[in-house]
Every structure is written in C-alpha cells, then in structure tokens.
Image: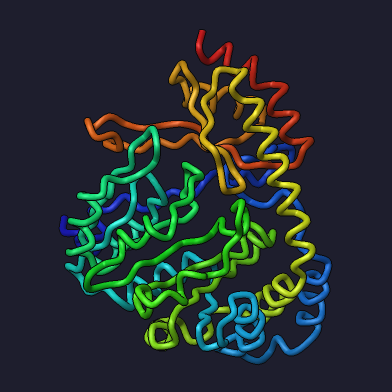
Amino acid sequence: MNSVFRPAVDRMAGYAPGEQPQETGWIKLNTNENPYPPSPAVVEAIRRTAEGRLNVYPDPLATSFRKVAARLFDVDPDWILPANGSDENLTIIVRTFCDAGDRIAYPYPSYVLYEALANIQGCPVSRLRLNEQTWQWDAPDAESLRKSVRLFFVPNPNSPTGNRWTPSQLQELLPDHGVLVLDEAYGDFCSQPHRGELLRQPEFDQRLIVTRTLSKSYSLAGLRFGFAVAHPDLIAGMQKVKDSYNCDAIAIAAATAALEDQDWMLSNRNRIVATRERLAAALPSLGFHTDPSETNFVWTRHSSGQHQSIYEQLKARKILVRYMRFPDAAPDGRMVDGLRITVGTDAEIDTLLSVLPEAVRIAVS
C-alpha cells in the first residue's frame, strides 16, 4: 500500500520528548524544568490579560516583549523575534534558510531535535562528533563541515554534556556560506552568563543567530515562549516565515513580566547553581563520573555502565531522571549513554541521593 506521507516523514523517527507523568507524587528530574515558581509579576500579568481583551488577536510582533528583551541584550527591538518556545525559532530558522538538499550540521551528542527538523525539511545532516572525554571536536572535521553546510546548530552550553564552548571555538564552526545558530537555552546558568556578545563581533555579523527560552531560568516551561536575537536583516527574513500570530496575548504578557523581574530569576538561578554543585560533589562517592556543568543539570556516567538499569530502579521509586543513549557517538562507532539529572529543589536532590545507593546496588548486582 502506498504511503500518503512525504518520503522524508516516512523515513524519520521523530523527536521523543522526556516523560511527563500527569499523576502527582513524582520527583521530576528528567526534562530540565526550573523547580521554582515564576515571578509573582508573571502571575499578575496573566491575570490582567485574562480579564482583558482575549477576544482580539495579540500583537503579531510582541512589541512589548521585544523592547524588554532588546534592553537585556543591548540591541534595538528589531533584533528580536519572539516565538512559541525556542523550538519554534529553530523550526523558523530551518524553513527560512534551507531548501531541501541543503546540509545542516550539529555537534553530536547534543540536541537531536536539530536532526528531526532537518529531516522534515528534506535536508541531509552531518554530525560533528565530540570526544567523549573532553566534549571537544576535531578541528579538521569542523573545517571540512563549515565549507558545506547551510546551517550549523550549536547548543551552548551543550545538552546533555553541560559544557560550554569559547568564542574562538565557535568561530571554527561559522559556515562559509550559511548561518551559525547558538542555542543558548541554558545561557543564564553559566558561570559567566552572557547576553549575545558575539552578535557585536564583526566576523559574526549577519551570520549568527542566538536563541533563548523562558522554559529554564524563568520557570515558564508550561507557557511556551522563546526568542531569537540576530541582525535585523536576518530577523526580517524570519518574520516572513513565522505564523501570523505565533505568540498569544497571555504568553506575551507573562514573558514580558518575567524578563522585567531579573532579581527573581537570578535568585532562583543562584539556588539552582548551588544545588548543582552539591549534587555533582556527591555523585562520585556512589561510583559516578560527573562532568563539570554550566547548565541546570548534570551529565553523569556510572563505572558499571548500567545506566538504563539505574534509571529503571529510580523510576520504580517515582524519581525520573533522563536516560540518554547516542548510537555511533564514539569515533570507533560505539554507543555513548548516561544519565542526565535535572537540578531540582534541595529536598528533591536529598531524596534522590538517599535512594540512589540502593538503586545502584540493585542495578549492578
């Protein structure tokens, strides 16, 4: 029987989000949500908007949000493109800059949604393998790819490894005839948080797009709001591709209020970073190797290699972490796998650390 789907859709597996149990009683440390609530100003902005004019369309450009975001990044508002989560920005970017057949590249292992978006668009994908000890790429491989790709997606800091690459390293990936996309979903958790400084360097002019999300540091994963920052000429092209009203009125109001309350975000961010360091320090005594993290999670691997079994033992105790596996990630073709653990509240991490020894003992026995 002939398929009614496009061949590209038939071939692809699709992106699989992390588990989202709907019943209560779970400790969720698997999808990098912020464990703390959003600013009270956000809740008030939602209330005011809900009581207002929901019978009319929202501002298609989200002007109020663009003005606030522009101040944070020291640019004009026409450098900002709001979206329904940063994943929509990634979709807009692929649709704006790539025809079917244009090559897209990304570091591997990292955010495999890039590959799914490329498949949907009919674009071939190149993986830039990372050394599993250092999470760095080989310069000759990067040099070869930059000559042939239309888009180079780079999550910085990276997920799941948690490391951050330097500006000089990122310049190695700048396509000769395309655009470099820095996915900074975890940018606020870096030891030195950044505000798009590379956008103002001449070598990156009109060749760089920075994407951000409010899901992580601003505690708005359930709202769905993100934005891109780029030269106005790039933003103007992306505006042609986005949906007419891609951000609803409640989301615009809430996101604007969230960005305006930097003190609230930074207070929660500092709590998460402190808990992250405590978690990372505790794991080695249980047989785990944990890489330094610049995010709101840690990437860790156990000496036994029994990562899936450890994940299952924790899940049986209603604690969710993310078991991740990346086929053909090592230079010799081996699979790389491990556990990505979101930094929860201190109480949630205390519970995890209290049950982890028993979970590990059963998993490796």
Viewer-closest of 303 and 243 = 303
45 with respect to 133 (left or right): right
Q: Is residue 175 visible?
A: yes
Can you give x and y, in whole percent of width and height, for residue 149 in the image?
A: 22, 64
The residue positioned 56% from the left and 56% from the top of the image is 186
Residue 177, placed above or below residue 2: below
The residue positioned 21% from the left and 57% from the top of the image is 145
Can you give x and y, in whole percent of width and height, for residue 24 in the image?
A: 73, 42
The residue positioned 59% from the left and 53% from the top of the image is 190
Q: Quadrant of the N terminus?
A: bottom left
The residue positioned 60% from the left and 59% from the top of the image is 193
Can you give x and y, in whole percent of width and height, for residue 308 in the image?
A: 47, 26
Residue 98, placed above or below residue 361: below
Q: Quadrant of residue 233?
A: bottom left
Viewer-closest of 363 and 139 = 139
Can you give x and y, in whole percent of width and height, for residue 31 in the image?
A: 57, 47
Q: How many numbered dots are placed on residues in this image?
A: 0
Viewer-closest of 92 and 140 = 140
Q: Is residue 4 visible?
A: no
Q: How is the image coloured?
A: rainbow
Q: Farthest top residue?
A: 365
